[in-house]
């Protein structure tokens, strides 16, 4: 079991308010990702749940039990840190066994669980090495191994992949997702990378300046962003926003169109946006065009990989009328 | 330093400094060894010439030598024990966030800046004097007979004074080691259910092993030659109760005006220091390997 409820949780460091007021309900077995720009309070929120920081107000319930004031060890959660935080003087085996040793588990149980963790994470042949003799990805696995042997109520991941190179990150992303499907334990995962959030999460919490902007499934966030911030944050490349007269035509303060929701034309068509290509990024599968649109500014367009636009080409853009997002003056979706 | 030419050039350029350094070390050592085999007494200028092993036999054969050797080891061991344990304890306290931390640290470090004879005098007259020392007053306050520290516990008193001087050094090194321990490691241990004692034992102590080694090695080098504190307080007495090897050399060479025997004692002291160093490196040196 591992349901986590936050009720009006607040956190401030002295005068600085990091989290004004957050209420969240995380169900048992869910994979929830906290995503947001740096400094939005996502790591602080995770540390509050872990018990590494004290709340300034509100209550934290784990499986319905009030754990607001409980020390980290009593909460039954396991955390994987950004720097892995392995104990450098202990072998991989001792690192993984450490939480069990602290819990005074009998030796056979420790051996058995370490063996299981090592098998799950492909660490078998490294058990007697020291952490410094391991690569980044292996260290990450040891950190996860140390977390799973405790059979916690929930796993907390604090930007665990940000120290890995791009290829390894994609790999570990898959491994963590698979691990979740295998263990079916609640996981909370903090990242600033919206691709990680979209690919891994059952539900995503988008945070901005300590506030929950939206809490929903990845596709919900993509298709029905609650406001301009979420619309701009989820999706890559970013959504294009247009203010003023063009937006007023759609009865909105501003409108947004995702790069993939445009039709392109080389020939002039009346009533569509005209622009000049400034940069064309050819990825093979797709082509990202940066287009300077007359009167509207720079826009990013995702075109088919076979399109061969180059710098200076004239292009005519037709936004997909059914996929125009409209926002009011406060940025809320209409 | 890639080519043979630059290597040769580098050696040539370094040579003068290396030669001066060699002379600087070798000449005094050679002279000491030379004198240790000579009949050379300042009281009797007629007694000259080669002495053979007589000076060594005189120094080592004397019962005071054995006692001085034991005293030296007790002095070094006692001070190491107090400073390492006390230093770790103080460092743990000073690592806690508290108001006036910067000032407090300077105050804690300050005994290290007091010169050894001055420190010894402060303790001798300010604290340990049975008549007007602070400890004497304390004893009298509780209706006890004041302790005459330097006559009743001469070696222990010297250990206390020297430990007081070196405690700040140990504390400082341990404090920097503590501060280099990553916060995430402590937090990880906390999440893993380690209480304060377990965190100290399994996380903090292994992290500090290297600095403990460094403190032990550096302090041993200095503690083998403790002199000023003994000279100012007990004068090596009563009898030979607080005489260490360094002070024995002084007593033989300077107080007894026997340069030959003093030199022999000096050579023996060098040999003992090397033996101690070898044992120490065997015992704790493995902690220095990264």
Image (spheres, coloured by chain):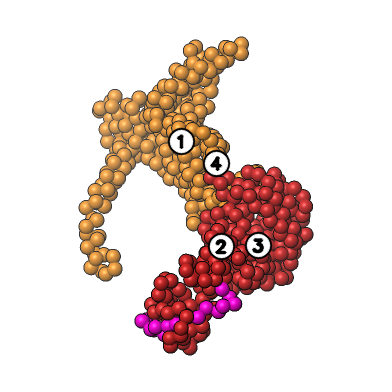
Q: Would you call the spot at circle 1 few (<14 residues within 10 Å), some (14-19), or many (20 or more)?
A: few
Residue that mark 2 sits on: A328
Q: Which chain is orange?
A: B
Between circles 3 and 4, the one closer to the viewer is 3
The answer to if B224 sits in the magenta stretch is: no
- In this rendering, the count of numbered labels is 4
Q: How far apart are marks 1 and 4 (CA)?
A: 21 Å
Pointer 1 residue: B102
Q: Which residues make up the magenta segment?
A: A308-324
Residue marked by disc 3:
A215
Mark 2 or 4, nearer chain start: 4
The quadrant of the rendering that contains the N terminus of chain A is bottom right
Tell me whether circle 3 and circle 2 mark residues in contact (CB < 8 Å). Answer: no
Q: Mark 2 and mark 4, same subunit?
A: yes
Answer above or below: position of A315 versus B104. Answer: below
State the CA–CA distance, disc 3 to disc 2: 20 Å
Q: List x then y, in percent, for residue B235.
A: 42, 23
| Side (left or right) of B160 relative to B42 | right
């Amino acid at each position: 079991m591992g349901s986590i409820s936050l009720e009006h949780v607040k956190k401030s460091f002295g005068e600085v308010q990091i989290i004004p007021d957050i209420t969240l309900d995380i169900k048992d077995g869910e994979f929830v990702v906290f995503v947001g720009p740096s400094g939005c309070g996502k790591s602080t929120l995770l540390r509050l749940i872990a018990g590494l920081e004290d709340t300034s107000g509100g209550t934290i319930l784990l499986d319905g039990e009030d754990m607001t004031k409980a020390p980290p060890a009593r909460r039954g959660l396991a955390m994987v840190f950004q720097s892995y935080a392995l104990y450098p003087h202990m072998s991989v085996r001792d690192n993984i066994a450490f939480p069990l040793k602290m819990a005074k588990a009998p030796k056979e149980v420790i051996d058995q669980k370490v063996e299981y963790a090592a098998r799950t994470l492909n660490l078998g042949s490294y058990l007697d090495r020291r952490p410094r003799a391991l690569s980044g990805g292996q260290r990450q696995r040891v950190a996860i191994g140390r977390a799973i042997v405790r059979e916690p109520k929930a796993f907390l991941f604090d930007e665990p992949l940000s120290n890995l190179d791009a290829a390894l990150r994609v790999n570990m992303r898959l491994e963590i997702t698979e691990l979740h499907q295998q263990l079916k334990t609640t996981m909370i995962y903090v990242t600033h990378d919206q691709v990680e959030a979209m690919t891994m999460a059952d539900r995503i919490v988008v945070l901005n300046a300590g506030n929950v902007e939206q809490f929903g499934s990845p596709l919900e966030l993509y298709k029905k962003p609650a406001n301009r911030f979420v619309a701009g944050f989820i999706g890559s490349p970013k959504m294009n926003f247009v203010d003023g007269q063009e937006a007023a035509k759609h009865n909105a303060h501003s409108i947004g169109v995702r790069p993939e929701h445009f039709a392109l034309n080389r020939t002039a068509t009346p009533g569509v946006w005209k622009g000049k290509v400034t940069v064309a990024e050819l990825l093979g599968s797709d082509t990202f065009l940066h287009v300077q649109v007359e009167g509207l500014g720079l826009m990013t367009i995702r075109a088919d990989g076979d399109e061969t636009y180059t710098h200076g080409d004239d292009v005519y853009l037709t936004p997909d009328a059914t996929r125009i997002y409209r926002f009011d003056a406060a940025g809320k979706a209409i | 330093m890639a080519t043979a030419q630059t290597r040769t050039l580098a050696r040539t350029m370094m040579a003068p400094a290396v030669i001066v350094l060699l002379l600087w070390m070798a000449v005094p050592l050679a002279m000491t060894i030379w004198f240790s085999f000579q009949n050379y007494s300042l009281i009797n200028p007629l007694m000259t010439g080669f002495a053979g092993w007589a000076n060594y036999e005189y120094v080592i054969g004397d019962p005071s030598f054995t006692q001085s050797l034991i005293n030296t080891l007790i002095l070094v061991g006692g001070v190491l024990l107090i400073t390492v344990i006390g230093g770790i304890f103080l460092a743990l306290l000073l690592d806690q966030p508290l108001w006036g931390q910067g000032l407090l640290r300077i105050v804690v470090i300050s005994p290290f800046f007091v010169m050894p004879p001055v420190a010894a005098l402060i303790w001798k007259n300010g604290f340990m004097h049975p008549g007007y020392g602070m400890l004497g007053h304390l004893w009298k306050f509780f209706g006890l007979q004041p302790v005459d520290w330097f006559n009743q516990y001469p070696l222990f008193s010297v250990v206390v004074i020297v430990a007081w001087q070196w405690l700040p050094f140990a504390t400082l090194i341990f404090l920097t080691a503590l501060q280099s321990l990553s916060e995430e490691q402590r937090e990880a241990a906390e999440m893993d259910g380690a209480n304060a004692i377990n965190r100290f034992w399994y996380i903090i102590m292994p992290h500090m092993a290297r600095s403990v080694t460094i403190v032990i090695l550096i302090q041993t080098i200095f503690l083998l030659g403790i002199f000023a504190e003994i000279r100012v307080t007990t004068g090596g007495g009563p009898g030979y109760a607080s005489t260490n090897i360094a002070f024995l050399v002084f007593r033989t060479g300077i107080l007894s005006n026997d340069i030959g025997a003093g030199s022999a004692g000096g050579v023996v002291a060098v040999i003992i220091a090397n033996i101690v160093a070898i044992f120490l490196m065997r015992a704790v040196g493995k902690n220095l390997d990264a």
